[in-house]
Image: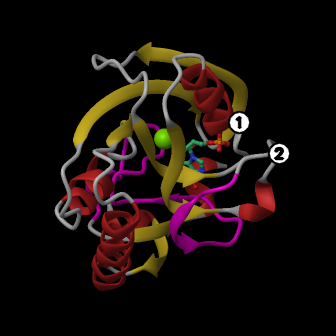
Amino acid sequence: MERDIERVLISAQELEEHVAEIGAQISRDFEGKDPIFIGVLKGCFIFMADLMRHVSIKCSMDFMAVSSYSGTTSTGAVKINKDLSEDIEGRHIIIVEDILDSGVTLNYLKNFLMVRNPASISIATLMDKPARRKADVYADYSCFEIPDAFVVGYGLDYNERYRNLPYIGVLKSEIYS
Ligand code: IMP
Ligand code: MG
């Protein structure tokens, strides 16, 4: 598995440090607001698990599953595979994403959730690839800004593989070409 990785972009230690900082920042910003964290499956699962252990305020959590990608290129279409189980009306929402790339997925999700009248919607992303942005959407909390490369690990996949790597790595281009 590791031979498919060209280089480590973000080490396990850097992940730990930056995720802890964002968790502390969110805890300060949402103190007394009882926010609901909405993880976008599957990519968020490791980030969210680590992030939540650095959130020290009263809050709740829920998950959604969406699909927009097959391979390394966006199909442009977003499909809701699993909706929320909690009611979000009047609640402060923090969407937890693995990576903000074109922004198509998050833009769609924000509009989809807005209709249910939450008190606010914020976005917390592990990584942001601003160079590839197509939709007008930005992250309120971002742990890392990264260049335009296809990355895997720490929850992120290429065709469902590599999610279990403990770091963020750049995949060798021969793997997906
Ligand atoms: P967007 O709609 O283009 O912003 O794409 C968002 C989704 O595409 C992310 O939640 C990821 O699941 C996936 N994605 C985008 N870039 C990468 C990458 O470099 N590696 C793995 N998945 C990615
Ligand atoms: Mg994702």
Amino acid type for the residue under numbered disc 1:
Val
Counting from the top left corner in percent of width and height, residue 50 is at 23, 62
Counting from the top left corner in percent of width and height, residue 164 is at 26, 55
Q: Which residue is mark 2?
A: 134
Instruction: Tell me which residue sits at (59%, 25%) in the image.
Output: 114
Task: Confirm whether the magenta stretch covers residue 76.
Answer: no
Say above or below: 110 vs 87. Answer: below
Magenta span covers which residues? Answer: 138-165
Q: Secondary structure at mark 1?
A: helix
Counting from the top left corner in percent of width and height, residue 143 is at 47, 71
Say above or below: 63 vs 4. Answer: above
Q: Residues within 10 Å of mark 1 (few under 14, many from 20)?
A: many
149 relative to 1 in the view: left or right = right
Q: Residues within 10 Å of mark 2 (few under 14, many from 20)?
A: few
Q: Nearer the viewer, residue 165 or 28?
A: 28
* Dominant secondary structure (helix, strand or loop) of the stretch shown in magenta: loop
Furthest-front residue in view? 32
Q: Is mark 1 within 8 Å of ligand 1?
A: yes
Q: Nearer the viewer, residue 40 or 112?
A: 112
Q: Earlier in the sequence, mark 1 or mark 2?
A: 1
Contact (CB < 8 A) between labels 1 and 2? Answer: yes
Instruction: Tell me which residue sits at (41%, 25%) in the image.
Output: 65
